[in-house]
Amino acid sequence: MDWGIKNRLSRLIPDGRCLWLPIDHGYFLGPTTKLEKPGETVKPLLPYCDAIFVTRGVLRNCIDPNSTKPIILRVSGGTSIIGEDLANEGITTSIKEAVRLNVCAVGLSVFIGSKYEHQTLLNLTRLVNEAEEHGIPVMAVTAVGKELEKRDARYLALCCRIASELGARVVKTYWCENFEKVVEGCPVPVVMAGGPKVNTELEVFEFVHDGLQKGAIGVNLGRNVWKNEHPVAMIKALRSIIHENATPKEANELFESLKKEK
Ligand code: 5RP
């Protein structure tokens, strides 16, 4: 593997595992709850994540350029939650810009099975061609738009495999039942997205732990962290599962004790 790609991936995945924090949601959701001021939301969480996933606008305006936290730059978009179809994405940000922003990876969504499958898959291949010339790895996000019910092992395995075949170095997908089928069919590392906030912290700890046992290398998990009433306790508890092999029960106990701290 190219030295630059390897070096960037090793900064993003420090010990073979990763905890990435996405704060890119505003690119189609606008000032969504708890992310109205992304810089303020993310500041107390930065010490505990391995990277943030962010658009260039939020990076330039809300993140301190003195920060050494690795960046994964969201480079697809062009749609909104009130528009016709979330899947109709293009590439929004040039590789020249990604190089200038000194990012460790670029990420874009593919919408497999949608009307825009072909377009978004060719976005991926174009991005891989351009990014790899500069030693920048591409993360593909297997997005489902509003169709959350699509998230089963058969569909997600298909999406992850296709994204890897087309050149993604990492694939971000949803956790699902029989998640081993998703990971086994994908020759590049798989990270788990969180999806909408779930009811209890334990549910999050359980699916993250399960996904790791089944071969995922970590998470790129946003709303279930920064929408939590105790986001710092939440990210520290997740960190204990990902980087210290804690069980869901141990992580929950840690969360309960940390949330009492001021
Ligand atoms: C939005 C994204 C987000 O980065 C992704 O959904 C992860 O965040 P969450 O855990 O909140 O689902 O790719 O398209």
Image (tube, rainbow, N blue to C red):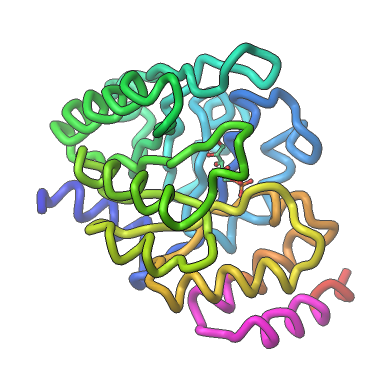
Q: Quarter for ligand 1?
A: top right
Nearer to me, 176 or 32: 176
Question: Residue 18, how many percent across, how many down?
Answer: 44, 63
The count of marks equals 0
Say which quadrant the C terminus sits in: bottom right
User: Per the image, is 259 magenta?
Assistant: no
Q: Please give the name of the residue rendered at 89% of the width and 75% of the height, measured from the top-left corner.
A: 260
Q: Is residue 253 above or below residue 69?
A: below
Q: Is residue 160 visible?
A: yes
Q: Is residue 255 above or below residue 32?
A: below
> Which range of residues does the magenta coloring cover?
239-257
User: Per the image, is 243 magenta?
Assistant: yes
Task: Name the quadrant containing residue 233.
Answer: bottom right
Drawn side of residue 218 relative to residue 166, left or right: right
Q: Please give the name of the residue rendered at 21% of the width and 38% of the height, measured from the top-left corner.
A: 166
Q: Please give the name of the residue rendered at 41% of the width and 66% of the height, measured from the top-left corner.
A: 216
Q: Is residue 48 above or below residue 71?
A: below
Drawn side of residue 132 relative to residue 92, left or right: left
Question: Residue 223, how many percent across, how many down?
Answer: 69, 48
Question: Residue 95, how many percent across, how many down?
Answer: 28, 24
Q: Is residue 178 above or below residue 257?
A: above
Q: Is residue 20 visible?
A: no
Drawn side of residue 19 relative to residue 130, left or right: right
Drawn side of residue 215 relative to residue 83, left or right: left
Nearer to me, 202 or 6: 202
Would you say the magenta stretch is mainly helix, strand or loop? helix
Nearer to me, 154 or 237: 154
Question: Residue 242, how many percent across, how many down?
Answer: 51, 73
Nearer to me, 155 or 76: 155
Task: Name the quadrant containing residue 190.
Answer: bottom left
